[in-house]
Amino acid sequence: MTLGITAQVSNAIREAIVTGEYEPGQKLSEAVLSEYYKVSRTPIREALKQLEREGLVEIIPRVGTCVTKPTEKELNELFALKEVLEGLAAGLLAERGNSEEINKLKAAVADMEKAIQISDNKQYVEANNTFHTVILEGADNSKLTTMLNLLLNQIPYNRYVFVTIEDPIRLKQSLKEHQLILAAIENGNCEEAEKSMREHVRASGAKLKTDIAKKLGTRNIN
């Protein structure tokens, strides 16, 4: 029973961090969280330990728990590797040409288009996640999947997607980039698929580093 409660609390706090409800650097009080989620401190404490392992929070002795803040170096490293790995994944899927996965990508892009029409950023982020997940799975390379997932778990990427798409111009550009990636994969153009994905990740990273410095704050920004 306790394990179930801990998992539920972990999911709730994780979503709050990812969507920006709890901002980077914000202190998370066990007492406040316990009262808010109406559970004892034990599952709260265990949930925070799990989120620390995921890189979402920092538990500092004699200080408390804070939502993790990225450094400029961490963001640079994340997006440099993400660009290479996701570009490779897109190229591999284009080479395989799996029609089932291509149809899933089409559905994800359609969901992105709908999300923009109804101004639903959460739906856009969910569709974005689906798009990138399908490409990674469609690459059919277990080592690549493991490497990218380990990378993304170190810094809560989804949280920053929400930040970047708050800009309507970037949101529309992001959709266009996904459409180009889809077209290249659908046409079986491996080089173009990899190129388009790398350009998308690079653009997202550049926008994020600008926004993160202004809105969320980072450590060690020069």
Image (cartoon, rainbow, N blue to C red):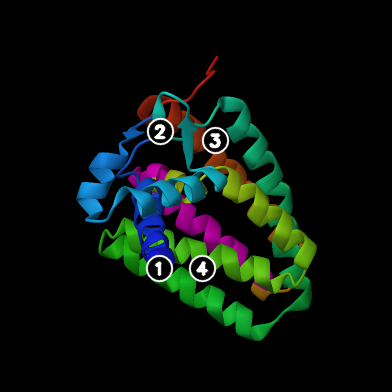
Q: Residue tagged by mark 4? A: 130
CA gap between label 3 and label 4 equals 22 Å
- Crowdedness near tag 3: few (<14), some (14–19) or many (≥20) residues, C-alpha within 10 Å: some
Please tell me whether mark 2 or mark 1 is closer to you in this view.
1
The number of discs equals 4
Q: Residue tagged by mark 2? A: 66
Camera sees residue 196: no
Q: Position of residue 38 (x, y in %)?
A: 22, 56
Residue 73 position (above or below residue 196): above
Is-magenta flag for residue 177? yes
Q: Quadrant of the rendered structure where residue 87 is?
A: bottom right
Q: Residue at x 55, y 48 (%)?
A: 54
In primary-sequence order, the first of circles 2 and 1 is 1
CA gap between label 4 and label 1 equals 26 Å
Q: Position of residue 186 (x, y in %)?
A: 65, 75
The secondary element bearing badge 1 is classed as helix
CA gap between label 4 and label 2 equals 29 Å
In primary-sequence order, the first of circles 3 and 4 is 4
Q: Position of residue 121 (x, y in %)?
A: 33, 56
Please tell me whether mark 4 or mark 2 is closer to you in this view.
2
Which amino acid, by three-letter code, is at mark 3?
Ala
The range drawn in magenta is 163-185
Q: Is residue 29 left or right of residue 54?
A: left
Which amino acid, by three-letter code, is at mark 4?
Thr
